[in-house]
């Protein structure tokens, strides 16, 4: 938003606040002053309140739209012509409050953005050679080395070049637990270095950072509308038209102007026009604080009706981090000696399994046999030497291609480990396999319970998609209680499967996923936010797990869970169901209060002033209800 429009908004805000204050004061004062003075004051204030309403009504008409302002301006004009000063004053108050709440709706979205924007760092210390220089953030570019001391916020996205620290990432993830960072780890703009000192090599700065992308998503989400919101707008158009026609009919059949005016004052639908978007804004703001970015109200609508959830396994249901579970020796060497040689091979490799081997040795306090020379063969393993021993570490196929001797007991153990869903690494010494190490990807905590929670919330079927073989996939699925699993999947076959599944099971576009066809519903896909962008883009509603720093996933997904917290899934599903329930509740509140108001007019209890007062007071019910969507 530019400065001129911000200034204009402030002026209108001041105008509405002054109008509300003066009108309220004048209405109270009218009980104590001469009627003529009070009436003139209320008339002047009501006329001032009429100006922005008529302007907005004309703007809508030029766009070929009927707005609530048209109905309200007609009611206000007739109130003034009928000299119903209190009615006019209450309409003025009602419309001014409606505009005020509309600005509150916009401000809530802006507040979330501003709360993220405050994390921007203006001044940065760069390391240039052996010196440090302070510069403005605009001067920093990719590749620069940034110094981040304890207590500083990260000014850029980047990779830790040197140093160690504990970082608070709650500004992005909603989690206050400290995350240890060391050389090679990623850090993100706005997170806080709570202890230690880091040199960070800049990867992204400014609009390209994860924080900037989050801000852009929140801004965009506030402008997107779901089918329920669009239906509400369409309903409002017809409602206004019918109200105007009904007023004409009432005049023809002989109702007097006061009765028609009372009806018009009851049926003004300004409250529902504000309450519907406010409920979604409140929910999106709450999600952002919890580290869950929801791209617009349509994502909430689809998630609330989700019946099928397709999910990646590695990095989604599991941590995506291998852990050593067993080591075997097939020769004369003791297990500790075998592990020491495994560590020697792993020491020169950056592979995730190599890191797991190093961590395992550190836990067991086993000193490595550091290689005299080493060579990593991409996709196969490592060739290295130590104390005259020629060693190979890697896949079974690497051993076979290198003509290593592999005993039947080794092959049998390898098959057993594979059937159990574990990966294996072999160690050959001087041409013979003498060691084997097995590892597996750890399941995330409480996965089985979380799956059960989503089923209570309406998910009929979970489908696990994995590249594992049938036996390995069956073992993981059985442990998690997932009945439907699909093994041996490549990224290409996964995309094809999702496309076919959508065609057979999706009921997207209906108001409630399963109403059109009991066998169909909304299809969701959940991936780990790294290599699932194509799959995320295909489903009715897509959820990226651990999207922090994963640009492709953030762009492709409807919902991004910034932290690797699977329990955010049922939490977000609950939030989606709540906001849809709140929205439906608002229509019920509006319908019941309107029906009650019309009944009171029909029996003669409410005249124009009473109808305006009634509408003004009942306006707060759906708006108050809408704010519930942003609470736990």
Image (cartoon, helix red, strand yellow):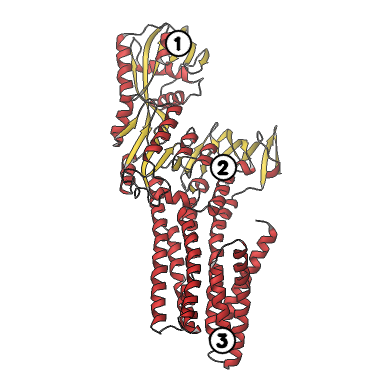
Asked where in the image residue 164 lies, by quadrant, the reply is top right
Point out the image quarter for the C terminus.
Answer: bottom left
Vertical comparison of 108 with 500: above or below: below
Marks 2 and 1: which is nearer the front? 2
Cα separation, mark 2 vs mark 3, equals 59 Å
Vertical comparison of 330 with 545: above or below: above
Seen as rendered, the residue at the extreme bottom is 34
Question: Which residue corresponds to the image point at 42% horizontal and 23% vertical from the top-left?
Answer: 357
Closer to the camera, 576 or 368? 576
Kindly identify which residue carries mark 2.
Answer: 210
Q: Callout 2: few (<14), some (14-19), or many (20+) C-alpha neighbours within 10 Å?
A: many
Kindly identify which residue carries mark 3.
Answer: 83
Choose the circle earlier in sequence order: 1 or 3: 3
Q: Callout 1: few (<14), some (14-19), or many (20+) C-alpha neighbours within 10 Å?
A: many
Choose the circle earlier in sequence order: 2 or 1: 2
Instruction: Give coordinates of residue 22: x percent, y percent.
Output: 59, 80
Instruction: Count up the numbered dots.
Output: 3
Kindly identify which residue carries mark 1.
Answer: 391
Question: Which residue corresponds to the image point at 53% horizontal and 90% vertical from the top-left?
Answer: 31
Question: Which residue corresponds to the image point at 59% horizontal and 50% vertical from the top-left?
Answer: 119
Contact (CB < 8 A) between labels 2 and 1? Answer: no
Instruction: Give coordinates of residue 443: x percent, y percent.
Output: 36, 34
Closer to the camera, 253 or 605? 253
Q: Callout 3: few (<14), some (14-19), or many (20+) C-alpha neighbours within 10 Å?
A: few
Choose the circle earlier in sequence order: 2 or 3: 3
Marks 1 and 3: which is nearer the front? 3
SS type, badge 2 = helix
């Amino acid at each position: 938003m530019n400065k001129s429009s911000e200034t204009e908004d402030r002026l209108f805000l001041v105008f509405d606040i002054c109008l509300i204050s003066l009108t309220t004061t004048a209405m109270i004062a009218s009980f104590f002053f001469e009627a003529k003075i009070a009436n003139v004051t209320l008339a002047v204030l009501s006329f001032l309140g009429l100006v922005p309403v008529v302007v907005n009504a004309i703007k809508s008409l030029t766009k070929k739209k009927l707005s609530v302002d048209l109905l309200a301006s007609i009611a206000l004009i007739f109130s003034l012509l009928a000299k119903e000063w209190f009615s006019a004053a209450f309409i003025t108050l009602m419309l001014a409050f409606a505009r005020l709440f509309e600005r509150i709706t916009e401000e809530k979205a802006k507040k979330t953005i501003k709360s993220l924007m405050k994390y921007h760092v203006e001044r940065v210390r760069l390391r240039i050679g052996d010196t440090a220089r302070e510069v403005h953030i605009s001067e920093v570019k990719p590749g620069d080395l940034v110094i981040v001391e304890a207590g500083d916020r990260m000014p850029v996205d980047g990779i830790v070049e040197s140093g160690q620290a504990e970082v608070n990432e709650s500004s992005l993830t909603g989690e206050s637990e400290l995350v240890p960072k060391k050389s090679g780890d990623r850090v993100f703009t706005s997170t806080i270095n709570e202890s230690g000192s880091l040199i960070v090599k800049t990867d992204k700065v400014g609009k390209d950072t994860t924080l900037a992308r989050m801000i852009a998503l929140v801004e965009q989400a506030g402008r997107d509308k779901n089918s329920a919101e669009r239906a509400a707008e369409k309903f409002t158009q017809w409602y206004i038209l019918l109200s105007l026609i009904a007023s004409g009919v009432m005049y023809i059949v002989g109702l007097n102007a006061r009765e028609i005016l009372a009806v018009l004052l009851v049926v003004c639908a300004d409250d529902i026009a504000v309450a519907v978007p406010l409920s979604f804004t409140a929910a999106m703001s709450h999600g952002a604080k919890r580290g869950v970015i929801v791209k617009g109200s349509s994502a909430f609508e689809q998630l609330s009706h989700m019946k099928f959830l397709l999910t990646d396994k590695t990095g989604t249901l599991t941590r995506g981090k291998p852990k050593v579970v067993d080591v075997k020796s097939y020769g004369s060497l003791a297990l500790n000696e075998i592990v020491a040689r495994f560590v020697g091979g792993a020491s020169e490799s950056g592979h995730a399994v190599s890191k797991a081997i190093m961590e395992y040795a550190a836990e067991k306090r086993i000193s490595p046999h550091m290689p005299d020379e080493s060579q990593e063969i991409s996709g196969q393993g490592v060739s290295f030497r130590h104390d005259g021993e020629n060693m190979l570490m890697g896949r079974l196929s690497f051993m076979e291609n290198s003509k290593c001797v592999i005993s039947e007991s080794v092959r049998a153990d390898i098959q057993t480990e594979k059937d159990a869903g574990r990966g294996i690494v072999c160690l050959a010494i001087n041409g013979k396999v003498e060691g084997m190490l097995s590892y597996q990807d750890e399941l995330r905590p409480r996965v089985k319970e979380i799956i059960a929670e989503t089923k209570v919330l309406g998910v009929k079927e979970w489908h696990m998609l994995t590249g594992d073989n049938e036996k390995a996939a069956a073992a993981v699925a059985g442990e998690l209680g997932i009945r439907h699993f699909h093994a041996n999947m490549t990224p290409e076959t996964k995309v094809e499967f999702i496309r076919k599944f959508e065609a057979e099971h999706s009921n997207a576009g209906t108001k409630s996923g399963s109403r059109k066809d009991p066998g169909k519903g909304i299809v969701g896909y959940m991936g780990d936010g790294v290599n699932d962008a194509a799959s995320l883009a295909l489903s009715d509603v897509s959820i990226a797990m651990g999207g922090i720093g994963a640009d492709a996933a953030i762009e492709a997904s409807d919902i991004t869970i910034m932290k690797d917290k699977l329990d955010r899934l049922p939490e977000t599903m609950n939030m989606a169901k709540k906001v849809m329930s709140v929205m439906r509740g608002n229509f019920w509140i509006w319908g019941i209060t309107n029906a009650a108001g019309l009944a009171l007019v029909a029996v003669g209890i409410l005249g124009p002033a009473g109808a305006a007062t009634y509408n003004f007071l009942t306006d707060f019910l759906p708006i108050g209800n809408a704010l519930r969507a942003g609470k736990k």
